[in-house]
Amino acid sequence: MDYLPVATLLVLLAFNVQVAFAIGIAALAFFVVSGAMPVQVFVQRFIAATQSFPLLAVPFFILAGAIMNEAGITRRMLHLAETLTGHVTGGLAQVNIVLSTLLSGMSGSANADTAVQSKLLVPEMARRGYDVGYSAAVTASSSIIAATIPPGIGLILYGFLANVSIGALFLAGILPGLLLAILLMIAAWVIARRRGYLPSRAKRASWQERWEAFKGAWLALLIPVGVVGGIRFGLFTATEAGAVAVVYSIAVGLVYRGLSWRSIPKVLSQSVLATAAIMLIICAANAFGFYMSWVGIPKQAANFIAGLTENPVLILLLINVLLLGVGMLIEGTAVLILLTPILVPVITALGIDPVHFGIVMVLNLTIGGMTPPLGTLMFVACSVTGVSIAKFTREAAPFLAVLLAALLAVTFIPQIALWLPSLGH
Amino acid sequence: MRMLRRGAANLDLGVACLALVVVVASVAWGVLTRYVVSQPAVWTTELSSIAFAWVVFFGAAAAMRRGMHIAIPIFVDMLPATARKAATLLSLALVIGFLGYTFYLAGLLSAQSFNRPSPVLRISFAYVYAGIAAALFLMLVHAILQLFAVWRSTDGTIAYPPQEAEEAG
């Protein structure tokens, strides 16, 4: 009887009911059937998440990213990335990965990055003789960097759900993101060399050229620096950093003359829709969370897993396998929202740092977007570039291997995530 | 007339966008006054939370019309057309029931909170909840329209207006 809402949820999800409504119906079923408290509590819990100040960071960083993109900052970053790595073998693949890394400090969503770069870079890569499948795979895999480098939407959601400092999560995500970038660049280089993909420029750009390109983009590069620095030194909270980033990006957009007042409604609409789609799931999950803690599901899950083994290494491995499996079937953000409240008590009971675990979980679930049958990154990359799912999967395999290796490293070497937040404490 | 209809149809998105502007402006103002003025504004947190509720629920209504709420179609897509149609109708009926009941509950909550003003701005929570109830009602209308569209379709897939789907991308 206690598990009736969970069963309801799974059946509804299988029947193509939108995730937010499936969770909402399952939660409402509990309130109606159990009779333990007035049904009014359901709607109060359903609305409660929108009254959370930390969650305001979600629309802020989505909006800042959309404004920056509209302001043409992507092209400036592309120019900078081109002068940095265009001369290397498979130059455009390197440029693609460096661009993902540069943009990750403005965008918190791997899906958005995949869409932008699939449109911008893949046609150019194809024109220069790069395999389209390879180009799409490089684009999708490198966009995962955006999930861990601040500001990441997944990190904000995890911070809210696990009651962990979003500032600490932002700091913890930096090194894992850079590690991903380096490993992906190596993998892309090895493949490009074997296939003879040419550099995108004849010779290395001079430092003069690089400096010029940097000057064209540095105002935008200040965003991640300002966000992380401002939070670290206590100037503002993560949410306030988001609002400041929005105002700042409007100013930069006007300075660069890429932003017109006419484009504001479009940018606002995009951000509202993306925010609402995520937040409605959070709202429903908040009501569902009431049921879960009422019945004691997190505790039961903790007991169950502790009964299997008490070895933290094995448990982390187990959780990673579980998340990869679930993440292949359900969109990563939805899984994050549903499973964080269950898993965090499990790992804290074992002495695992919830900040460290947050990076592992967000990285893991974003990687799930690369795989069939339901990877969102894969769908976005394939639909924009016109590559078949089968071809994408084949070309993405080596990058997926690299991403999984990075996931293992981040899981079992906690210092990669925790070194930066520990500085100065 | 067409513009009027589009305007009415996009009312939800318009309200949500305005609310988002309020959220951004009030939080930014809160930071600014903390560093510039000796007396930081105390109302900004409250106003931003109130406006955020409207961003989320009116935005969710707009997202619903564009088919932007994620689902897992993989199993239903494996069914033959008639079974898929039946499954989609059934799940839409459930969503309609859910939205209808939640709308009723939110309306009730609004009516009960007339004498509950917010701490600083003294805005009655009745208005906050009434907005949420209105947005839930819009979602209910969209769900019912989708039910009719699926009923008329042959294979049970939900078609979204192309123009709006494009805006969403």
Image (cartoon, coloured by chain):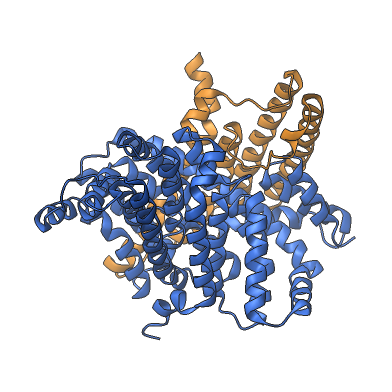
Chain colours: A blue, B orange
In front here: A276 or A12? A12
Q: Position of residue A376 (x, y in %)?
A: 55, 45
Q: Is residue A369 left or right of residue A314?
A: left
Query: Depth check: A373 or B109 in front?
Result: A373
Residue nearer the viewer, A147 or A53: A147
Residue found farthest to the right: A1
Q: What's the residue at 42%, 49% (across, down)?
A: A138
Q: Which is more toward the observer, A51 or B125?
A: A51
- Residue furthest top as drawn: B1
- What quarter of the picture does the N terminus of chain A occupy? bottom right
Q: Is residue B55 visible?
A: no
Q: Is residue A182 visible?
A: yes
Where A106 sits versus B68, above or below? below
Q: Give me the residue at 72% from left, 19% from top.
A: B153
At which x and y percent is residue B60?
59, 41
Q: Is residue A64 above or below residue A316?
A: above
Instruction: Classify residue B146 as left or right of residue A76.
Output: right
Count of numbered circles in the view: 0
Q: Quadrant of the C terminus of chain A?
A: bottom left
- Could you tell me residue A358's position as x and y percent? 54, 68
A210 over B16 or under it: above or below: below
What residue is rendered at 76% in x and 64% in y? A292
| Residue at the outermost bottom position | A425
